[in-house]
Image: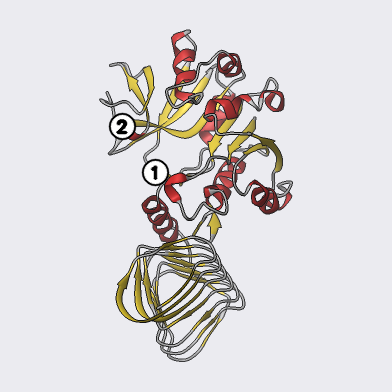
Amino acid sequence: MKGILLHGGHGTRLRPLTHTGPKQLLPIANKPMSQYCIESMKEAGVTDIAVIIGGIGSNKVREYYGNGEKFGVKIFYIEQESPKGIAHAIGLCHNFIGNDKFLVFLGDNIIHKNIRDFANEFVNSDDDASLLLCEVKNPSQFGIADMDNDGKITRIMEKPKDPPTNFAVTGIYFLTPKIFEIIENLKPSWRNELEITDALQILLSENNKISYHIITDYWKDTGTPEDIINANKIVLENQKSYFYGEKSDGVSLTGTVLVGKGTKIIGNSQIDGPVIIGKNCIIHPDTRIGPNTSIGNDSEIAKCDIENSIIMSGCNINGDFKIRKSIIAFNCILTFKKSEYQSFLLGEGTNISI
């Protein structure tokens, strides 16, 4: 079975974080969110993966993943010139897929469940598609599956105003080449996109067999800053501690703490996990890094108090102030005098001095 990873789109809900690169490369627990997708696909036995790229920062995707060798997979790149929908992106992969069954993963989906069993079941079945569904609190914001009393899928619809169920179609699809003929004849939606939910509904209406599994483990499509901060929290909560850096007397470490090589944590600092601190960082005295926080490589943090936040690589933050529920992109500089509370959403290279 082959795989398709969708890595395009503009990420408008995540601006200014996405002004300089694709949202799927934004880090969660110091690792790009799309890397979790590749790792999940690999765990499912999928090692030949077409990565659909397009829009701002496509070159960064190529630079990070290369040919896939360092991730244990083979990566092939396919350009989508403009964001014309998920179904359109899948359709671009017809030649790559050939006659194989395949797995599609949206690059901003985080899932804890190992999907190997689902993949094996699909490969050995006569299903024409298989979906992973998840109960959500806000079904009108998702593609939704409706089922009859026997548990059979009867309808699939995109973001209905009056959802018949709260079972969202996650961004993980098991498909066969039958879908390509449907996509070729698919008409754009009101968004002027080829919707995968429309293609699946047609597949269903033509009496093809669509199975599903309901996942109860954590799943999230990380479309908003709040989603990313929450995903960072959940991922950190499931990590195991390690410490490859250096710490001086007086440093307090509690909970799950992960510290990379070359990092120095200097006296009177407090790290309350779950926290991950990357490589070659300096954590100065009188600094507190609290729960659910990620600090990227080569960052320097002094005097401040940080919780529930993502600080990306190359940042320099100095000042007697609190940072909460923030995402601070690569290579930002923040210098503050005393301040009680700050919440930031900062794009790459921001420099603030107050």
180 versus 5 height, above or below: above
Is disc 2 surrounded by few (<14), some (14 to 19) or many (20+) residues within 10 Å?
Answer: some
Of the 4 image quadrants, the one containing the N terminus is: top right
Residue 140 - label: 2
Circle 1: residue type: Asp
The image quarter in which residue 155 lies: top left
Q: Position of residue 220 (x, y in %)?
A: 41, 44
Residue that numbered label 1 is attached to: 217
Q: Position of residue 11 (x, y in %)?
A: 48, 45
In this view, the mark in front (1 or 2): 2
Q: Nearer the viewer, residue 203 or 101?
A: 203
Of the 4 image quadrants, the one containing the C terminus is: bottom left
Q: CA distance from mark 1 to mark 2?
A: 21 Å
In the rendered image, the residue lying farthest to the top is 206
Circle 2: residue type: Ser
Residue 110 seen from this side: no
65 versus 275 height, above or below: above
Secondary structure found at label 1: loop
321 versus 21 height, above or below: below
Residue 118 seen from this side: yes
Report the residue at 70% width, 41% height from top.
75
93 versus 106 height, above or below: above
Q: Position of residue 203 (x, y in %)?
A: 49, 14
Report the residue at 39% width, 43% height from top.
217
Report the residue at 68% width, 20% height from top.
99
Secondary structure found at label 2: helix
How many discs appear?
Answer: 2
